[in-house]
Image: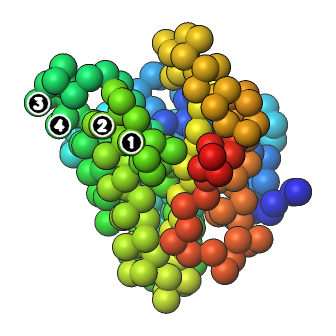
Amino acid sequence: MDYDFTGKTALVTGSTSGIGRATALKLAAGGAHVIISGRDLARGTATVAAIRDGGTTAEFIAAELSDVASVRNLAARALEIGGGRVDILVNNAGHAPFGPTADVTAEEIDLVNATNVRAPFLLVAELAPGMVANGAGAIVNVSTMVANFGMPGMALYGSSKAALQLLTKAWAAEFGSHAVRVNAVSPGPTRTEGTVGMGDGLDQLAATTPAGRPGAADDIADAIVFLVSDSARHIHGAVLPVDGGRLAV
């Protein structure tokens, strides 16, 4: 399905690779002015070039989402680029460590929660009021299937994303009456640059799903783009599983 985002400005965090990049490309293909965000200048520049080569507009803003000042700067610059408005926010960036609870350091706990919980919270706090004032907006938070059930080694990551899912519902309740929709996607095993380190573990995990294979970045991006589109106009506070059916078994 083709979606029309003409005249809309979209900010996608963590959009220099993986799910975020795939989402940015699809939003741009629908006519959105996309703001690419990440830490890697070279990858950000390449993503912007790919979008511009396709005939639409994009900008790159470098950001470190574990740093409060950097997050606030990202929001301010996004509003400046968007002429005072951001119509679509995709909180995709996240830090995803895995390992035994006893091995987790206090510094890792702080980093994961700063990136996965505090940064989305601050971006919504900075950008949602403008959406309310404009009478429209769409926000999608990227969670994970391990926010919904226990898995060894995933306590820190899963709990941070479980918090983000609760925030999704709270924000849907807070902003929905002002025509600002907030939803989430919950990916399962997905083959991206970020999951390369899992090796055969990704395929083994995916083999437990009805689909029997890892998802691709485009699979998740398609769901995100649907949720921010007018086709999802009556969907608020949903957490959409895009996990190959893992929650069915």
Answer with mark 1 or mark 4, whichever residue precedes in sequence. Answer: 4
At a point 79% along the width and 54% down the height, the residue shown is 30
Residue that label 2 marks: 155
Task: Please name the amino acid that badge 2 sits on.
Answer: Ala
The residue closer to the viewer here, 11 or 149, is 149
Task: Please name the amino acid that badge 4 sits on.
Answer: Asp
Q: Quadrant of residue 53?
A: top right
Answer with mark 1 or mark 3, whichever residue precedes in sequence. Answer: 3
- Do residues under tags 4 and 3 come within 8 Å of each other at their CB atoms? yes
- Do residues under tags 4 and 2 come within 8 Å of each other at their CB atoms? no
At a point 51% along the width and 71% down the height, the residue shown is 237
- Do residues under tags 1 and 4 come within 8 Å of each other at their CB atoms? no
The residue closer to the viewer here, 132 or 151, is 151
Secondary structure state at the residue bearing disc 4:
helix
The residue closer to the viewer here, 97 or 87, is 97
Q: Position of residue 49 (x, y in %)?
A: 68, 28
Answer with mark 4 or mark 2, whichever residue precedes in sequence. Answer: 4
Q: Quadrant of residue 55?
A: top right
Task: Please name the amino acid that badge 1 sits on.
Answer: Gly
Secondary structure state at the residue bearing disc 2:
helix
Q: Nearest to the eye among marks 1 and 2: give it.
A: 1
Secondary structure state at the residue bearing disc 3:
helix
Secondary structure state at the residue bearing disc 1:
loop
Q: Nearest to the eye among marks 4 and 2: give it.
A: 2
Whole-number angstrom distance, CA of label 1 to CA of label 4: 21 Å
Would residue 97 be seen by someone viewing this image from the given angle? no
Whole-number angstrom distance, CA of label 3 to CA of label 2: 14 Å
Q: Position of residue 149 (x, y in %)?
A: 43, 47
Q: For mark 2, does the 10 Å Cα neighbourhood hold few (<14), some (14 to 19), or many (20 or more) residues?
A: some
Whole-number angstrom distance, CA of label 1 to CA of label 3: 21 Å
